[in-house]
Amino acid sequence: MPLKQPNISFDGLIAFVRSKVFWYNLAAAIAGIILFFWVVSLILDVYTHHNQSLSVPNLKGLAYNDVKNVLAKTDFEYAINDSMYTPDKPPLTVLDQTPEPNQKVKQGRTIYLTVNSRKAPTVKMPELRDNSLKQATLILQSYGLRLGQTIYQPDLAKDAVLDQLYRNKSIAAGVQLQKGTVIDLVLGDGLGQTTVEVPDLMGLTLNEARGALQMASLSLGNVEADNTVGSDTLTAYVYKQTPIFGSITDTLKAGQPVDVFVTKDKTKLPGIH
């Protein structure tokens, strides 16, 4: 037999909606929904440590072995994410970190570290000859090499690279070098075969004599120190030079060297007895 459908009149429905039973049930349902979402939110807050953020410590510049001590009393984890080579930093020094220092993060967050490599990677020496000083400098930087001394020699091409030196010896392109290696450049002075007079260096400190020679478009040659000079030759005084100032041979081609003899004994200087 087919089930009989309940016979609910419109008036009966209105009466039910207006009854206290309906409103009590509705209020209970709403309260139940609110309570449900509050409990869920509370559980999520506890699970995710809501509003329990910590400030990330600054680990940059620390040795990797010291990182463990710094983080021992915190809830942070740490891991090496990358390495790179910086010649002026000790091996395994922390160079960078993620997240950044003082950033607010959740407890238990892992701090990823970039540390300095133990050994510099190697690169091939580029060909710098016939480039300008500016171009050669940019090329060295792109290879991770460093520019050392610039040594000028007579040549009509101003600041053109005539030779590239490693440890005072010419180095060919393609030779493997460690990143950070210092390369000296021999450059044209733009003067060619111009002759200049040798300046009077007597009584000047070695540092002052070097500057005077540069101003005269000459270079400093051999430096011979007597027994009064220790390791600090730059403050020693020139008491003899070759060629001698005022002599018949006191002119040189631009860029040529002048040899000097230095002392800390001022009695050797001209006019002092």
Image (cartoon, rainbow, N blue to C red):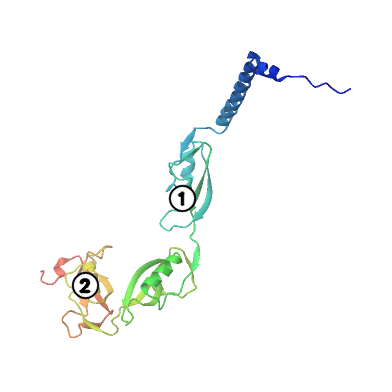
Q: Which mark is residue 96?
A: 1
Above or below, comparing residue 137 to residue 104 in the picture: below
- Label 1: how many Cα within 10 Å (few below 14, some 14–19, many 20+): many
* Closer-to-camera residue (263/28): 28
- Looking at the rendered structure, the kind of residue marked 2 is Ala
- Could you say where residue 218 lies in the image, as x and y percent from the top left? 26, 77
Above or below, comparing residue 263 to residue 153 in the picture: above
Q: Which mark is residue 209?
A: none
Q: Secondary structure at mark 2?
A: helix
- Could you say where residue 176 lies in the image, as x and y percent from the top left? 50, 69
- Label 2: how many Cα within 10 Å (few below 14, some 14–19, many 20+): some
* Closer-to-camera residue (111/45): 45
Badge 1 or badge 2: first in the primary sequence: 1
* Closer-to-camera residue (32/26): 26
Quadrant occupied by the C terminus: bottom left
- Seen as rendered, the residue at the extreme top is 20
- Looking at the rendered structure, the kind of residue marked 1 is Asp
Task: Tell me the distance, in whole angstroms, between the alpha carbons under discs 1 and 2.
Answer: 45 Å
* Closer-to-camera residue (53/129): 53
Disc 1, disc 2: CB below 8 Å?
Answer: no
- Seen as rendered, the residue at the extreme right is 1
- Name the side, left or right, on which 87 lies relative to 247: right
Q: Which mark is residue 212?
A: 2
In percent of the image, x 62 and y 19: which residue is there? 28
Q: Nearer the viewer, mark 1 or mark 2?
A: 1
In percent of the image, x 49 and y 67: which residue is there? 123
Above or below, comparing residue 242 to residue 147 in the picture: below
Q: Secondary structure at mark 1?
A: strand
- Name the side, left or right, on which 226 lies relative to 94: left
Work out whether residue 42 can be spotted. yes
